[in-house]
Amino acid sequence: MEKFFINGQKKLNGKIKVSGAKNAAVAIIPATIISDGVCNIENIPNISDVTLIGKILEKMGAKVRLTSKSSLEIDPRGISSSDVSYDLVKKMRASSYLLGALLARFHSASVPFPGGCNFGVRPIDQHLKGFSALGTECKVENGIVKIRANKLAGSSIYLDIVSVGATINIMLAATKANGLTIIENAAKEPHIVDLANFLNSMGADITGAGTDCIKIKGVSKLSGSSYSIIPDQIEAGSYMVAAAAASGNVWVENVIPKHLESISAKLQEIGVKVEERGDTIRVVRSGKIKKCNIKTMPHPGFPTDMQPQIAALLSTADGTSIINESVWDNRFKYTDELGKMGANISVDGKIAVINGIKELVGAPVKAIDLRAGAAMVVAGLCAKGVTSIENIHYIERGYENIVDKLSGIGADIKKVVEPDEDFFEKAL
Ligand code: EPU
């Protein structure tokens, strides 16, 4: 079993570089399926979610080749079937993007349902509503989503909920539909804009990405393209919060400061200095941090994917902070883990009340999902003593080389392989 061990309360100092955005990569890689040529994608983060989606495409018949540490060449022309097996997709939520991409290319797709996750049910009704509006028949049979269209025709779709996944899937499906598709109440996250830019670089005609109204004029063909993925907003935000938690003076490099405004604003509100310089953000903390209230919202609001990390930081703030999680139903389970380190957090449904304490104390804790895992790292960095974190595969889904990156700015963090507790029993 692999664990992280963090010996906390080391001051963080220096420069840390952010990798390409996970949530853009896991949309852009499936989007290559629609292309009629070879795609070169740069600034690919070296994380397990990306490896997995690359393998899925490869098993489907695409040629996928790493051309450098962070560049992937994908030739999707060998993909001949629109059926995806359960074994291929069971580990990955973002496999739902195969639906939109395969629908655009083959006018049909059969993909096992992505299912739930550790922070609530993850329905896809808005994805299916979009596909239906484009003229697709959709059914879910034995956990498999089956969609088929004779032809895809542009349409107007008003999303009932601002959904990143539905916006992406409809954009993918509509790229080669006949006529104009309009998505109203669309999500505005940076990776939606990145996907639109990538599709446009292949010859798609998409305007309005980044606003709540996206227009997609169908085109008949997409060429290959070379494209570089944007920096990861949430990885950057996580390191900003880590720097604040560990009384750091840290330059977070390779960021788009505009994408980080909601996070910078909260850090400033609690007394942390945040300074922008080009594609770098400097975070400096000296002294105690103040309480604050946060409501997570779709972009440009405060991201739900930063909620656990900022909660870890606020657990030692001066006073009581309130976090209202408005995107996911059940994203506070990790607070039990922070409780093991002494945090005083009470949760009622989608509200968490954090009574700031003097300091966290290192303890054995678990990552219960990706961002909850990042919160354990933040907590470990500022806690007194040693924190061990189990289930680090969750963290490695989304943070490239986190141990090396944090060690590079002075954290005392190690990845340790421990014998599996059942090892001896299994060996008998
Ligand atoms: N929803 C519906 N119906 C749908 C789709 C969504 O009711 O058809 C609801 C969800 O249950 C949720 C809300 O709408 O309450 C927002 O869900 P959304 O579709 O926006 O989320 P997603 O596309 O499944 C992406 C990110 C998540 C991030 C959310 C919200 C990717 C691969 N995942 O998920 O990222 O939390 O948007 O910003 O882009 C992460 O990176 O750790 C992560 C979980």
Image: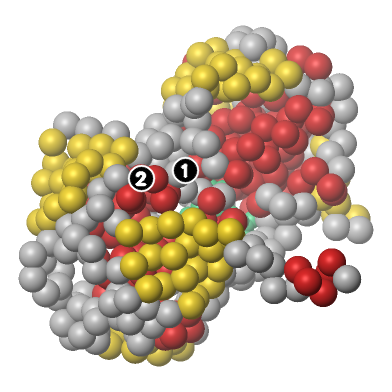
38 relative to 111, above or below: above
- Identify the amino acid type marked 2: Lys
Give the left or right position of residue 111, taking residue 198 as reference: right
Where residue 240 appears, as percent x and y from the top left, is: 26, 54
- Identify the amino acid type marked 1: Glu
Q: Residue furthest right?
A: 142
Image quarter (top left, top right, bottom left or bottom right) of the N terminus:
bottom right
Q: Residues within 10 Å of mark 1 (few under 14, many from 20)?
A: some
Instruction: Choose top left, top right, bottom left or bottom right for residue 33.
Output: top right
Residue at 49% across, 26% down: 70
Where residue 189 appears, as percent x and y from the top left, is: 42, 45
Judge whether residue 203 can be spotted in this image: no
Q: Earlier in the sequence, mark 2 or mark 1?
A: 1
The residue mark sitting in front, 2 or 1, is 2
Where residue 396 appears, as percent x and y from the top left, is: 53, 51
Disc 2 vs disc 1: Cβ atoms closer than 8 Å? yes
Judge whether residue 393 can be spotted in this image: yes
| Residue 400: mark in rendering | 1
Distance from Cα at disc 2 to Cα at disc 1: 8 Å
